[in-house]
Amino acid sequence: MAYHNISVRAEKRSRNKGVMSERQNTAVCSFDTKSPPISALDIHNWNFEQLHVPENVVTMVQIDGTRRQVYTKFTDFEYLQDLLHSTTGQSEYKHDIGEISQVLIEMAGTGTRCGRLANLPTETSDEAVSFIFSQYGEIKRCSKRVGLRPIVIRF
């Protein structure tokens, strides 16, 4: 049985408001994984004091503690654009103990995604698989492997 491993870099989203989904109004702030844990109150204060995000434009803040990521959903895409433009995709967070952590800020869902296809005929070429998946973004890597491992897809 042949498997194709694929890495796709998602394309930037359209600015047309008519076709945008709710996820496109979401920013993800990725904190350094080696930094000390941050409380929800600290994140709330950091969002409004450091990033200067008005409280009335935020509909939800979700914390993923294991990945050290904070998702902030805005009411409109323009606020997300303003945040990304004003911070140039990076910021700093100063912990209570004085340590400073670098924070990467980007639009949620635009990173590299990996997946595995299974049960394809062994004669299926990497170029054919890359062509089919090119509609989802730029294909970074596509490689064929032969083995009897279970199907794993992460998107």
Image (cartoon, grey):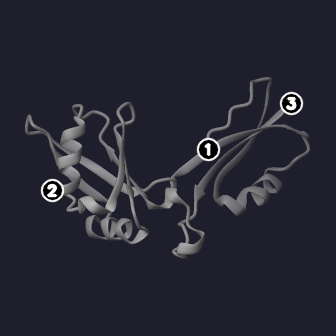
Q: Position of residue 75 (x, y in %)?
A: 39, 63
Residue drawn at 46 percent across, 54 percent down: 108
Judging depth in this view, the residue of 80 and 91 nearest the camera is 80
Q: Is residue 105 above or below residue 77?
A: above
Q: Quadrant of residue 36?
A: top left
Q: Nearer the viewer, mark 3 or mark 1?
A: 1
Position of 96 with respect to 77 (left or right) is left
Instruction: Mark 1: give few (<14), some (14-19) or many (20+) Cα within 10 Å.
Output: few
Q: Position of residue 111 (x, y in %)?
A: 51, 53
The residue indicated by pointer 1 is: 155
Mark positioned earlier in the residue sequence (3 or 1):
3
Amino acid residing under circle 3: Met
Q: Is residue 92 above or below residue 76?
A: above
The residue indicated by pointer 3 is: 1
Q: Nearer the viewer, mark 2 or mark 1?
A: 2
Residue drawn at 51 percent across, 74 percent down: 15
Amino acid residing under circle 1: Phe
Q: Position of residue 116 (x, y in %)?
A: 71, 39
Position of 114 with respect to 121 (left or right) is left
Check residue 49 in the rendering and tell me which mark sits there, or answer none.
2
Q: Residue furthest bottom?
A: 16
Residue drawn at 62 percent across, 39 percent down: 154
